Amino acid sequence: MDDDDPLLLHGVGTKFTEQIKPRARVALSSAVGSYSAEVLEVLSDTQLKVKKEFGTDSGKGTTKFREKVVDAKKSGKPGLTYKVVPHIDQAAMFGAVYNNLKNGGCIGIFPEGSCV
């Protein structure tokens, strides 16, 4: 995370232009609080902008994030690990459901889980 801008993330050895698209989410490990942030813009292979700070609207995850980066660097790591959660546009699916219901059709919903 940039020292001056908490919305600017810096990667080390990353290829953000190939790995991440806008609207995807960058998810941090549970060691940092399992925070995630939506990607607003991919600036380069090593820089991207997120829409909001990690955590809630108050950015409460930012402080923890910065502390964990310092700890990682002290232990010889260049930063924190992350995962990319791709954005899935559900607009076509919701449009098809709406049109089907509007035309008198029906839909089936199958909740996941187990019955006891």
Image (tube, helix red, strand yellow):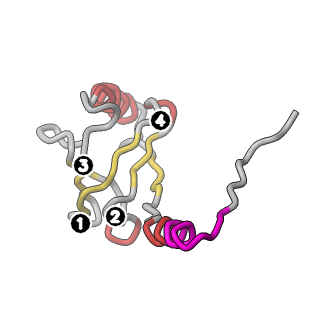
Q: Secondary structure at mark 1?
A: loop
Distance CA(mark 2)–CA(mark 1): 7 Å
Query: Where are the magenta residues, as a range?
Result: 96-107
* Residue 50 versus residue 35 in the image, above or below: below
Q: Residue flagged by tag 1: what amino acid is it?
A: Ser
**Which of 112/99 is in front?**
99
Mark 3 in CB contact with mark 1 (< 8 angstroms): no
Measuring 76% from the left and 43% from the top, which residue is drawn there?
113
Give me the C-alpha separation between circle 4 and circle 3. 17 Å
Residue, disc 1:
44
Residue appearing at x 19%, y 43% in the figure: 2
List x then y, in percent, for residue 71. 38, 28
Q: Which residue is mark 4?
A: 34
- Contact (CB < 8 A) between labels 2 and 1? yes
Q: Residue 16's mark?
A: 2
Whether residue 31 sits left or right of residue 15 in the image: it is: right
Q: Residue 14 falls in which quadrant of the image? A: bottom left
Instruction: Give me the C-alpha separation between circle 3 and circle 1.
Output: 16 Å
Between tags 3 and 2, which lies in front?
3
